[in-house]
Each structure stands twice: as C-alpha cells, then as structure tokens.
Amino acid sequence: MNDFQLMQTYAGARLGQLTARVAEDERGSATAEQIVMIAAAAVGAAAVGVIIWQKMTDGANSIQTPAP
C-alpha cells in the first residue's frame, strides 16, 4: 500500500466517522428546537408590536385639535 492509498483510506474513515456522528448524535437538538421556537415567537411579537404602533399612530393623527 503506497502513501496515497493510505491517506485515501484514512480520509475515508475519518469522513465516515464524522458523517455517522452528525447523523446519529442528537446532543443539542433540543436547544436548536428551542432557539427556533424563541425566534418565531420574537418575530411574531415584533409583528404584533408594529401593528399596534401603527394603529396608535393613526389614531393619534386622526384627533382633531382646534386652531386658536
């Protein structure tokens, strides 16, 4: 076995080990799901905040004030 074949076998084994670890390792999956849920809640809260702000601004602008 020459050096090239040895390095090719080693790289293939390391790549196989890495893909197996990524596919089967579930550590941190709960954290990732929580991050996605928190991000979705934050986006929803921001959207509701923008809608409320626009309604308040429109309501305030529609108040008639008498001119002296």
Image: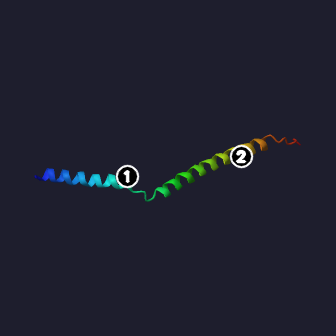
Between the C-alphas of marks 2 and 1, the distance is 44 Å
Residue at 23 percent of width and 52 percent of height: 11
Rendered view: 51 above or below 9 = above
> Reading the chain from its start, which is encountered first: label 2 or label 1?
1
Which secondary structure lies at badge 1? Answer: helix
What percent of the width, then of the height, locates residue 4? 14, 50
Name the foreground residue: 31 vs 26. 26
Give the residue furthest to the left. 2
Q: Quadrant of the C terminus?
A: top right
Q: What residue is shown with label 1?
A: 23
Which secondary structure lies at badge 2? Answer: helix
Mark 2 or 1, closer to the camera:
1
Is residue 60 left or right of 23 when viewed as pictured? right
Give the residue furthest to the bottom. 27
Residue at 29 percent of width and 55 percent of height: 17
Q: What residue is shown with label 2?
A: 52
What percent of the width, then of the height, locates residue 46? 63, 49
Task: Tell me the tag on residue 6.
Answer: none
Colour mapping: rainbow
Residue 67 placement: quadrant: top right
Q: Amino acid at mark 1?
A: Ala
Name the foreground residue: 28 vs 42. 28
Give the residue furthest to the front. 24
Name the foreground residue: 55 vs 13. 13
What percent of the width, then of the height, locates residue 15? 28, 52
Label 1 packing within 10 angstroms: few (<14), some (14-19), many (20+): few
What percent of the width, then of the height, locates residue 28? 45, 58
Residue at 78 percent of width and 44 percent of height: 60
Label 2 packing within 10 angstroms: few (<14), some (14-19), many (20+): few
Q: How many marks?
A: 2
Residue at 64 percent of width and 50 percent of height: 45
